[in-house]
Amino acid sequence: MSGSTAAPEQLDERLVHASPLRKLLGRPELGSVVGAVAVFVFFAIVADSFLQASSFGTVLYAASVLGIMAAPVALLMIGGEFDLSAGVLVTSSALISSMFSYQMTANVWVGVLVSLLVTLAIGAFNGFMLTRTKLPSFIITLGTFLMLTGLNLGFTKLISGTVSTKAIGDMEGFDSAHALFASTLTVGGVEFKVTILWWIALVALATWILLRTRFGNWIFAVGGEADAARAVGVPVVRTKIGLYLGVAFAAWISGQHLLFSYDVVQSGEGVGNELTYIIAAVIGGCLITGGYGSAIGSAVGAFIFGMTSKGIVYAEWNPDWFKFFLGAMLLLATLLNAWVRKRAEATS
């Protein structure tokens, strides 16, 4: 009609171009990267040996041992859940491999495979109990933590007569298993543990899952609002069980590294490590409430942990201060991540 005013065209918000600054501020790991740079510069100034190539290999090793577990724990937290049994599950995995191989006088690879099956079964148990009972993951995995702690000690003393396993270093297959899980690579005269490669591979796999697969979309959905995700067809039960299986798989890798690095395993190890995995994920940008975070952020959080734990030694400080610095970094990283999120929302 003549004289009528045409309505302005509405621009689809999905087609709006995001500026590089907006994309950068929207990254969950931005705050942890800033923190990592600050920690690196700090120890480079106060510790003369921190910048040596050999020190770098040691820092990466400390970070990788934590980072192998931090990556799947980060995915689990993005999915809105916790696993307080992750630390002792690593020890359980190592104990199963060692005791099964020794008692059955079998090739150690038999024990390794049995350990994989049992460890995955424990992860599936956590996920199944969570989805069936509807209890908080804190309660479910706290129960698993206590049961595994008792089983680790009880079975080890029952079978070995002590709190540690018997040595299996002279058994068939030990050398090849050691090469896969605990060997040392020399690059340019610097020694690097194979766990660094495991760490990189797991972070890359977790990042690909989160950003390039349907399962990654499901993880963010169930972490944001499980009921809403279920209403639009997301398989919530399958997703959460899958996340716990991911934690169990990483625990198996870490457990085999523990066993084949030292040949024997102390049954009381691993208690408290689950909190360190969660701290690394939170420092890396994961929200306690779920639905937000990244695997790369967990790697940066683990790297900060490695720099701090070894930087204090290189600076010749009392290592008793480590927990203080770890707690301070947790608070500062959380505050910085919250500020970054607010800035990102302000630019949207």
Image: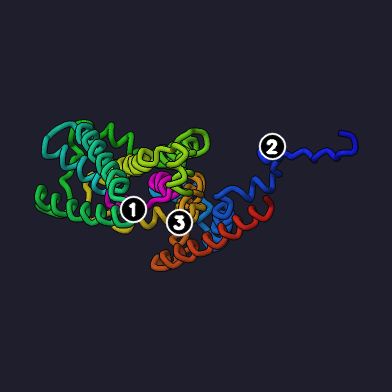
Circle 1 residue: 137
Q: Judge whether residue 50 can be spotted in this image.
A: yes
Q: Is residue 270 magenta?
A: no
- Sequence-first disc among 1 and 2: 2
Identified by mark 1, the residue type is: Ser
Circle 2 residue: 15
Question: Residue pushed farthest front?
Answer: 1
Magenta stretch bounds = 67-89
Residue at 14% over, 50% down = 156
Task: Give the crowd class for mark 3: few <14, some 14-19, many >=20 residues within 10 Å.
Answer: some
Identified by mark 2, the residue type is: Leu
Circle 2 SS class: helix
Q: Judge whether residue 90 can be spotted in this image.
A: no
Between residues 106 and 71, which one lies in front from this camera angle? 71
Structural distance between the alpha carbons of marks 1 and 3: 12 Å
Residue at 47% over, 39% down = 232
Identified by mark 3, the residue type is: Ile
Dominant secondary structure (helix, strand or loop) of the stretch shown in magenta? helix
Between residues 175 and 186, which one lies in front from this camera angle? 175
Quarter of image, res 142 = bottom left
Between residues 204 and 23, which one lies in front from this camera angle? 23
In this rendering, is residue 99 above or below 175? Answer: below
Quarter of image, res 257 = top left
